[in-house]
Image: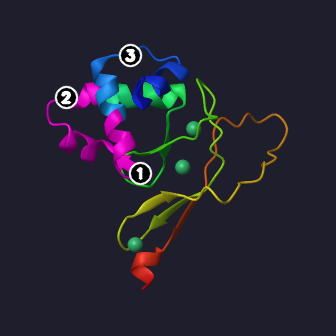
Amino acid sequence: MNRVNTILQQKSIRITPMRQLVLRHILQEEAVFGLNKLEEALPKSDRITLFRTLKTFEEKGIIHSIPNGTSEVKYALCKEHCGPGQHLDFHPHFLCIKCDHIECIESVNIPKLHIPEGYIGLEFNLTIKGICIQCEN
Ligand SMILES: [Zn+2]
Ligand SMILES: [Zn+2]
Ligand SMILES: [Zn+2]
């Protein structure tokens, strides 16, 4: 069985040609991607379907979204331990202010944050803005 189907089955996602197509593309391409680029790369698929597919992938723990301060949501592939309704991507994201490069900083673990009693934290994220290694040189 190929990797695409294996991942879809692992995350209990019903296999459809569209989901296979999108996931195959994500696995081949660069680590972080946005809807616009995906749409360009897969011209035969319409934006709504693509968006829904990404939402499903996000809900099931295949990809996680990266808040980046623009209207276009960026996504990155999750590690295997993420699953339906549960993301364990506790790493910061780096955003280069010069070239807009975004990446997962997997080597850094965000420590558990303690919020005041009575508050319910639903998601938290850490984005580091700065200058990437390419732009530094
Ligand atoms: Zn995840
Ligand atoms: Zn850069
Ligand atoms: Zn990430």
The quarter of the picture showing ligand 2? bottom left
User: Which of the marked residues, 1 or 3, is nearer the chain's N terminus?
Assistant: 3
Q: In the rendered image of this protein, does residue 110 appear above or below residue 61?
A: below
Q: Residue at x 52, y 17 (%)?
A: 12
Q: Which mark is residue 32?
A: 1
Residue drawn at 32 percent across, 32 percent down: 22
Residue 2's disc is none
Determine whether the residue tagged by mark 2 lies in a helix, strand or loop. loop
Residue that label 3 marks? 15
Binning the other alpha carbons within 10 Å of mark 1 as few (below 14), some (14 to 19) or many (20 upward) gives some
Start-end of magenta stretch: 24-50
The answer to whether the residue bearing label 1 lies less than 8 angstroms from the nearest atom of ligand 3 is: yes
Q: Residue furthest right?
A: 117
Q: Residue shown at 48%/31% (left/top)?
A: 58
Q: Residue furthest front?
A: 1
Mark 2 lies on residue: 46
Q: Is residue 12 left or right of residue 44?
A: right
Say few, some or many: other residues with alpha carbon within 10 Å of mark 3 (under 14 / 14 to 19 / 20 or more).
Answer: some
- Whether residue 3 is in magenta: the answer is no
Residue 40 coordinates in the image, percent (x, y): 19, 44
Quadrant of the image occupied by residue 102? bottom left
Residue 39 on image: x %, y %: 22, 39
